[in-house]
Image (cartoon, helix red, strand yellow):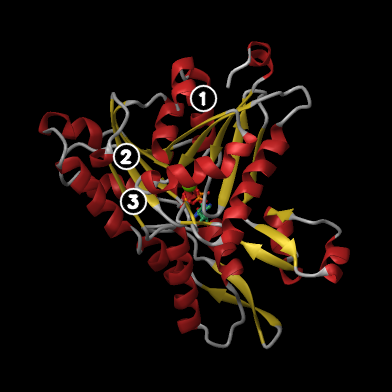
Amino acid sequence: MSSKKTVKDNLIVGVDLGTSRSAISANTRKKRWVDSYVGWPRDFIAKKVVGKSILFGEEALANRLSLELSRPLASGVIKEGIERDEKAVRELFKHLVDLVKAKKNSAVRAVVGVPAESLKANKIAIKSAFADYTESLMVVSEPFAVAYGLDALNNTMIIDIGAGTIDFCIMHGTVPTDEDQRTILTAGDYIDEQLFNGMKARYPGADFNMEMVRRFKEKFSFVGELEEPVEIDLPVASKMTPHDITEEMKNACESILPAIIETTQELISNFDPEFQNLIRSNIILAGGGSQIKGICSYMQEKLSEDGPAGVQRVEDPLFAGADGALALAKDMPESYWSED
Ligand SMILES: Nc1ncnc2c1ncn2[C@@H]1O[C@H](COP(=O)(O)OP(=O)(O)OP(=O)(O)O)[C@@H](O)[C@H]1O
Ligand SMILES: [Mg+2]
């Protein structure tokens, strides 16, 4: 349904639904992101304590002991059949839209980015989940949204290093097909597990949890060589004690590299031989994992064994997907909206 009076007041949004973080960019220039957690109070005492009927993001995580907590996007896919997670995705989307919506906005148009390979499986689930909150909706692959936002639509490869998945996508001047895209499952969460296990093995007496390990990673992640050692404080028998985790950090971060290199090489080698050097020279890393120190030069060096190579990272990994989805939403011809 389209109404003439609404066009000017339409809220147009680009949304990046992620395993760990979800972001929204609106045509009003507002941008917001939340950790992808949704929680409901467990009982009436919990409700009195938290003072709300639903909590999101960091606030939900901080109150997790009082809540039924959902991280609803396993590998960027709505965990289908799990009613609570389906409800959580709906609430998360509504929450994101509410964060950027103004009173005068009468209808919402959204382009939503999801991981490349799960696009088909997700499309229907996502469409039905958000139908109540949108006048029109399109679902696209996440790396395609990133590429669109950067205007990198030709002879480029986008590699989106997220929490649950790494998504690869070759752009060659048209909407990418299945052959142009791959997803692998050893991403940020996997690094966290490796780092956790490495630290446990070396420092069995130290006390730490997965959340702490993720924060250490986000502060000190690196591959290759580092000038300064990575030293952190951990409680041992409740006393804060310095620990060196340089080796563990390096090994954990480097554990995702062989699969990244292999998948990149495979995608390029399947491509038209005359364009392989061009694509290898135009690789763009996106997603939180693109922030790992040294990852661009490490990959560039490895890939240059095959021919000329260039690897860069996006400027704003948090919003590159949502901004790209918004750009796509703004440019989308009217006929696409109505036919979808
Ligand atoms: N500086 C950093 N170094 C290494 N990893 C980081 C850094 N900052 C964020 N990350 C990691 O990036 C991941 C989150 O990235 P992003 O927000 O792109 O993922 P997502 O979109 O939620 O996940 P997915 O795309 O798999 O659904 C997390 O694993 C996070 O710990
Ligand atoms: Mg993502």
The answer, for residue 262, to whether it is visible in the render is yes
Label located before the other in sequence (3 or 2): 2
Amino acid carrying label 2: it is Cys
- At x 60%, y 74%, the residue is 209
Q: Is residue 65 above or below residue 146?
A: below
Label located before the other in sequence (1 or 2): 2
Label located before the other in sequence (1 or 3): 3
Q: Which mark is residue 169?
A: 2
- Helix or strand or loop: what does disc 3 sit on? strand
The answer, for residue 296, to whether it is visible in the render is no
Relative horizontal placement of residue 207, taking residue 77 as reference (left or right): right
- At x 33%, y 51%, the residue is 183
Q: Residues within 10 Å of mark 3 (few under 14, many from 20)?
A: many
Task: Kindly identify which residue carries mark 3.
Answer: 183
Amino acid carrying label 3: it is Thr
Find the distance from the CA under tag 3 to the CA under tag 2. 9 Å
Q: Nearer the viewer, mark 1 or mark 3?
A: 1
Q: Place residue 66 in its image quadrant.
A: bottom right
Q: Are marks 3 and 2 in contact (CB under 8 Å)?
A: no
Q: Is residue 206 above or below residue 286?
A: below
Task: Kindly identify which residue carries mark 1.
Answer: 329
Name the foreground residue: 246 vs 106: 106
Query: Which residue lies most toward the left here?
Result: 273
| Image location (x, y in percent) of residue 143 | 40, 38
Find the distance from the CA under tag 1 to the CA under tag 2. 20 Å
Q: Nearer the viewer, mark 1 or mark 2?
A: 1
| Image location (x, y in percent) of residue 26 | 63, 28
- Helix or strand or loop: what does disc 2 sit on? strand
| Image location (x, y in percent) of residue 314 | 45, 36
Relative horizontal placement of residue 50, taking residue 267 as reference (left or right): right
